[in-house]
Image (cartoon, rainbow, N blue to C red):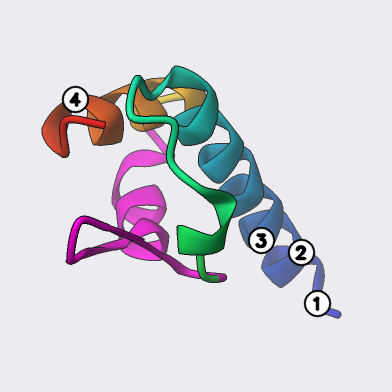
Amino acid sequence: MDEKIQTNLKLLQDLKFWIYKLSDYRVDFRNFGILTFEVRGTVINLDSIVRTQKKDHTIEEIAWRVVKEYQL
Protein backbone atom coordinates (compact mmCIF):
# COMPACT_ATOMS: atom_id res chain seq x y z
CA MET A 1 0.00 0.00 0.00
CA ASP A 2 1.21 3.50 -0.80
CA GLU A 3 2.83 5.28 2.17
CA LYS A 4 0.58 8.35 1.78
CA ILE A 5 -2.54 6.17 1.86
CA GLN A 6 -1.27 4.41 4.99
CA THR A 7 -0.58 7.75 6.66
CA ASN A 8 -4.05 9.05 5.80
CA LEU A 9 -5.72 5.87 7.05
CA LYS A 10 -3.73 6.12 10.29
CA LEU A 11 -4.89 9.72 10.74
CA LEU A 12 -8.50 8.67 10.17
CA GLN A 13 -8.12 5.79 12.63
CA ASP A 14 -6.66 8.15 15.23
CA LEU A 15 -9.46 10.65 14.62
CA LYS A 16 -12.09 7.95 15.13
CA PHE A 17 -10.43 6.92 18.39
CA TRP A 18 -10.38 10.51 19.70
CA ILE A 19 -13.99 11.14 18.70
CA TYR A 20 -14.99 8.00 20.59
CA LYS A 21 -12.88 8.91 23.61
CA LEU A 22 -14.00 12.55 23.82
CA SER A 23 -17.71 12.08 23.15
CA ASP A 24 -20.30 12.06 25.92
CA TYR A 25 -22.60 10.28 23.51
CA ARG A 26 -20.23 7.27 23.58
CA VAL A 27 -20.67 6.51 19.94
CA ASP A 28 -20.57 2.93 18.77
CA PHE A 29 -17.61 1.85 16.65
CA ARG A 30 -20.07 0.18 14.27
CA ASN A 31 -21.07 3.69 13.18
CA PHE A 32 -17.62 4.29 11.73
CA GLY A 33 -16.89 3.50 8.10
CA ILE A 34 -13.43 3.77 6.61
CA LEU A 35 -13.89 7.40 5.53
CA THR A 36 -17.17 8.38 7.18
CA PHE A 37 -18.97 8.33 10.49
CA GLU A 38 -22.73 8.11 10.90
CA VAL A 39 -24.55 9.37 13.97
CA ARG A 40 -28.25 10.08 14.43
CA GLY A 41 -28.89 9.92 10.70
CA THR A 42 -26.08 12.32 9.77
CA VAL A 43 -23.10 11.12 7.73
CA ILE A 44 -19.88 12.95 8.62
CA ASN A 45 -17.12 12.80 6.02
CA LEU A 46 -14.05 12.32 8.22
CA ASP A 47 -11.73 12.10 5.23
CA SER A 48 -12.72 15.57 4.08
CA ILE A 49 -12.43 17.01 7.58
CA VAL A 50 -8.92 15.60 8.04
CA ARG A 51 -7.76 16.81 4.64
CA THR A 52 -8.86 20.38 5.28
CA GLN A 53 -7.70 20.66 8.89
CA LYS A 54 -4.64 18.44 9.39
CA LYS A 55 -2.12 21.12 8.44
CA ASP A 56 -3.31 23.54 11.11
CA HIS A 57 -4.66 21.26 13.85
CA THR A 58 -3.75 18.09 15.72
CA ILE A 59 -5.96 15.03 15.39
CA GLU A 60 -7.18 15.57 18.94
CA GLU A 61 -8.18 19.18 18.12
CA ILE A 62 -10.03 18.01 15.02
CA ALA A 63 -11.82 15.37 17.09
CA TRP A 64 -12.89 18.02 19.63
CA ARG A 65 -14.34 20.10 16.81
CA VAL A 66 -16.32 17.14 15.49
CA VAL A 67 -17.56 16.25 18.98
CA LYS A 68 -18.69 19.82 19.63
CA GLU A 69 -20.16 20.47 16.19
CA TYR A 70 -22.24 17.28 16.15
CA GLN A 71 -22.97 17.34 19.89
CA LEU A 72 -21.53 13.93 20.55
Q: Who's the residue at 80% across and 77% down the image?
A: 2
Dot 1 corresponds to which residue?
2
Q: What amino acid is labelled 2 in the image?
A: Gln
Q: Is residue 22 magenta?
A: no
Question: Do labels 4 and 1 touch, CB within 8 Å?
Answer: no
Q: Whole-Å distance between the Cαs marked 2 and 4?
A: 27 Å
Task: Pinpoint residue 52: horizontal percent, then vertical percent.
Answer: 29, 51
Question: Do labels 3 and 4 touch, CB within 8 Å?
Answer: no
Task: Pinpoint residue 28: horizontal percent, then vertical percent.
Answer: 50, 48
Q: In front of the other: label 2 or label 4?
A: 4
Task: Pinpoint residue 37: horizontal percent, then vertical percent.
Answer: 38, 60
Q: Give the extent of the magenta segment.
A: 34-56
Q: Whole-Å distance between the Cαs marked 2 and 1?
A: 6 Å
Mark seen at residue 68: 4
Q: Tell me if mark 1 has few (under 14), some (14-19) or many (20+) residues whose alpha carbon lies within 10 angstroms of its own.
A: few
Question: Do labels 2 and 3 touch, CB within 8 Å?
Answer: yes
Dot 2 corresponds to which residue?
6
